[in-house]
Image (spheres, rainbow, N blue to C red):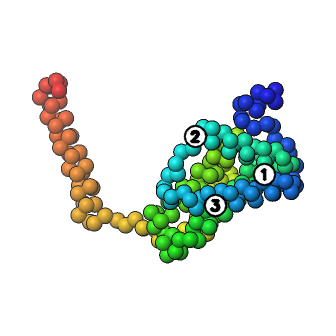
Amino acid sequence: MFQWLRTKTGCPPAITSYLPSPLFLYGVTCMVLMCGRLQALVPSEATPPKRSESQRASLCDVYCSMCDETPLSRVECYSEFLMYCQKTFQSEMESINASDWCMWDNVKSPYNKFTVCSEDIAECLALPWPNRLVEDMFVEIHSSFFQECPTETLRDPPPNVIFALVMTPICLIPAMVVLVVLKTKNGDRRS
């Protein structure tokens, strides 16, 4: 059964408990340091380059083995990995001038990287995405970085546009009634 689960999800079954082992913390720290340096080499684009299946599988193996070496459940382990994604996002956002946070062209790359990071790890750990943890993280990100962004308030259209939109059906209804009455009055029931 466990062999089937491993091939189906890519990860062996989760072990549930609450205290992370020092080995897990060491592994997460090493991964953060390695990936942090690698990300500095990646050009700042809206969509990062696609990984090959073998690269993706090896990353999934790393995530799964790190989670399996701890007594954490899959969700708790995913929560720890989400913290890494969030820290990366925060460091990229802090490198952008705070006055530029409200311009989408400036924040779409870090925002997309956070999305891809959270989605890839969830997929590797066989967790649904989006999920409650990710939604809470997005709410936290928006309240931290985008709360002060001005939003365009919707305003009413000019009076002449409203007048045209209201009067068109009002004028068409009597014209249609007259056509129906004339057609039925003459006894001509053909259309």
Q: Which quadrant of the structure image shows residue 95?
A: bottom right
* Residue type at the position of mark 1: Glu
Compared across the picture, whether 100 is left or right of 91 comes to left
Q: Is residue 4 above or below residue 169?
A: above
Q: Which residue is mark 3?
A: 37
Compared across the picture, whether 128 is left or right of 153 comes to right
Q: Is residue 52 above or below residue 148?
A: above
Nearer the N terminus, badge 1 or badge 3? 3
Q: Secondary structure at mark 3?
A: helix
What is the crowding at mark 3: few (fewer than 14 residues within 10 Å), some, or many (at least 20)? few
Can you give x and y, in whole percent of width and height, for residue 50 in the image? 54, 45
What is the crowding at mark 2: few (fewer than 14 residues within 10 Å), some, or many (at least 20)? few
Q: Which residue is mark 1?
A: 76
Can you give x and y, in whole percent of width and height, for residue 177 in the image? 21, 40
| Quadrant position of the C terminus in the picture | top left
* Residue type at the position of mark 3: Arg
| CA distance for labels 2 and 1 | 27 Å
Please say whether residue 128 is visible from this viewpoint: no
